[in-house]
Image (cartoon, coloured by chain):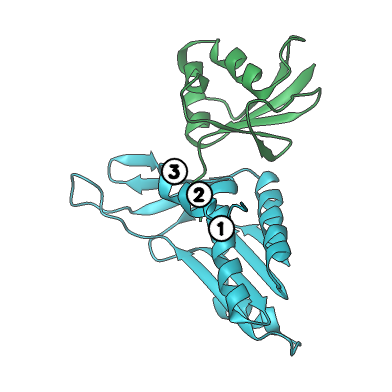
Chain colours: A green, B cyan
């Protein structure tokens, strides 16, 4: 399964990446599992760890950790929004 | 019904006029304009010098259109307009415009406030303040979540 992952704002700066294309193991099928998978890279990626205030979107809709992730999805991680 | 996400400034007067142009059924137009504020920085005599707004192209337009559609389902609206800027903005400059046209003021006021409250918590924008000590990301406010939460249907 191949997906695109995007990072925004302070998270993008911390990680040093704005986007990446990932091939995921079959057992990672939710946003929460993807987030843990990324956090397990260690170092700066711990910014995605449990307890950090990170929001997610799948295909440009804001979702919770239980949301499914499927092949070719666009998943984004970002801090709480501060527009307006 | 329309949404714009743009770097350019907007003409508030022209936007307000457009909400009722050519029609005789609009009895109320309510608007909100958000501006960059030169907040004083804690622990120094300095103020915010500029602000840079980042957004998520694609999702931003989708989120704003969804908020606009939800307002249209809750209240009787004859027109809505949302403009949100991104890029580098200076204190005093305009960031956001929300305009709502309705037959009556009650719906116009409520829908305008609802759109702003939802925009604050659902539209993917992030503010970074330029200070003499460098760039600083603005933290989300719990008060904004509370403001959006009061519109939840029980």
Q: Earlier in the sequence, mark 2 or mark 1?
A: 2
Q: Quadrant of residue A38?
A: top right
Residue B6 rendering spot, x and y as whole percentages: 62, 58
- Mark 2–mark 1 CB contact (< 8 Å): yes
Residue where numbered disc 1 is placed = B85
Question: Circle 3 sits on which residue?
Answer: B140
Image location of residue A59, percent across then percent down: 74, 36
CA distance for labels 2 and 3: 14 Å
The quarter holding residue A22 reads top right
Against B152, residue A55 (above or below) is: above
In-image side of B51 versus B22 (left or right)? left
What label sits on residue B53 in the rendered view? 2
State the residue at coordinates (26%, 54%): B40
Q: Secondary structure at mark 2?
A: strand
Q: Are marks 2 and 1 on the same chain?
A: yes
Q: Secondary structure at mark 1?
A: strand
Q: Where is residue A31, by image quadrant?
A: top right
């Amino acid at each position: 399964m191949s997906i695109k992952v995007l990072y925004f704002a302070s998270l993008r700066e911390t990680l040093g990446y704005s986007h990446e294309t990932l091939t995921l193991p079959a057992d990672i099928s939710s946003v929460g599992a993807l987030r843990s998978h990324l956090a397990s890279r260690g170092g700066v990626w711990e910014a995605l760890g449990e307890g950090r205030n990170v929001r997610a979107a799948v295909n440009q809709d804001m979702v919770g950790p239980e949301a499914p992730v499927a092949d070719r999805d666009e998943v984004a991680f970002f801090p709480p929004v501060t527009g307006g | 019904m329309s949404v714009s996400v743009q770097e350019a400034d907007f003409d508030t007067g022209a936007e307000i006029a457009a909400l009722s142009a050519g029609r005789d059924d609009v009895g109320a137009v309510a608007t909100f304009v958000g501006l960059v504020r030169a907040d004083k920085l804690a622990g120094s005599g300095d103020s915010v010098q500029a602000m840079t707004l980042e957004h998520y192209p694609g999702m931003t337009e989708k989120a704003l259109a969804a908020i606009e559609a939800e307002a249209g389902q809750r209240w009787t609206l004859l027109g809505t307009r949302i403009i949100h800027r991104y890029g580098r903005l200076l204190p005093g400059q305009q960031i956001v415009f929300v305009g709502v046209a309705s037959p009556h003021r009650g719906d116009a006021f409520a829908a305008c406030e609802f759109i702003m409250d939802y925009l604050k918590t659902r539209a993917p924008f992030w503010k970074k303040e330029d200070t003499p000590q460098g760039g600083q990301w603005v933290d989300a406010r719990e008060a904004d979540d509370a403001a959006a939460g009061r519109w939840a249907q029980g």
